[in-house]
Amino acid sequence: MTVWGKVGKFQYSIGLFDGVDGGPNQNDKVLYASRIAFNFLDMEVNPGYYTSSTYFGEGGDILTFGLSFQSQADGTGTAAEPGDFSATIFDMLFEKPLGRGAAITIESEYKWFDAELTPTAAADPSCFCLFDGNAYFVTAAYLLPGSGLVRYQPYVRFTKNEPTGAPDSDLTEVGVNFVLKGHDARLNLNYTTGNANLTGYRGPDRDALFFGVQIQI
């Protein structure tokens, strides 16, 4: 269940969710999630309480700061060794149309994760182990001028993970979006280098080339 709305330049959403079901959460404790945001310039306009990381220059002058919080008692660990989980997230989005269809976009996010994992739970293969520590990323993108069938948006993104009690890791991504119809139809080609991965912990140094397709109705 989610309740959302706006008051002046403020936007808010508050929700209750299942979160992790079973495992460490044997008593069906609820995940609480919320976000507040302030639009300093033009208001971001999205369906429901969703957000966008870019409006491809069509959303006006955007400068939004957001603060999110999530928590779930017994949201991590194992049935025998449950632990609480919480996350605080600060995000920023800036976008400026530059004329002739061009736009610059800067997005960043900083996350604080607190996962109460015991050594016993962390060593258990059945552990629903969530990341504990800090992480952030910064993205800068430039939508090239034009109005043809395909729009080009080169970008660069830097991500860093700082887990508690483990080595830091980072990843640099350089790519280009081929924009056919905003978020509804988009291709992506990117090159990444670094030792960060989805677990949040350091992996081997790798270079990779990716191609992606986004289609939504």
Image: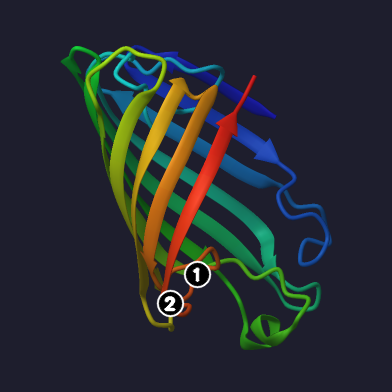
Type of the residue with mark 1:
Asp
Q: Nearer the viewer, residue 186 or 35?
A: 186
Q: Is residue 20 left or right of residue 11?
A: right
Of all residues, the one furthest to the front in this rendering is 149
Out of 149 and 51, give the one closest to the viewer: 149
Residue 171, compared with residue 137, is above or below; it is below
The residue pinned by badge 2 equals: 164
Gap in angstroms between the C-alphas marked 2 and 1: 6 Å
Q: Residue at x 58, y 52 (%)?
A: 71
**Rendered residue at 45%/63% (across/down):** 208
Residue 113 pos. (x, y %): 47, 61
Of 118 and 124, the residue lying toward us: 124
Which image quarter holds the C terminus? top right
> Residue shown at 61%/43% (left/top)?
32
Residue at 46% x, 26% y is 12
Front-lying residue, 156 or 148: 148
Looking at the image, residue 152 sits to the left or right of residue 211; the answer is: left
Q: Are marks 2 and 1 in contact (CB under 8 Å)?
A: yes
Q: Residue furthest left?
A: 98
Side of 169 relative to 62 (left or right): right
Tell me which corner region of the image, top left, top right, bottom left or bottom right, holds residue 80.
Answer: bottom right
Counting from the top left corner in percent of width and height, residue 99 is at: 16, 13
Numbered disc total: 2
SS label for mark 1: loop
Quadrant of the image containing the N terminus: top right
In the rendering, at what x and y percent does residue 141 appear? 27, 37
Amino acid on which disc 2 is placed:
Thr
Q: Secondary structure at mark 2?
A: loop
The residue where tag 1 is placed is 132
- Residue 49 in sight in this render: no
Quadrant hosting residue 76: bottom right
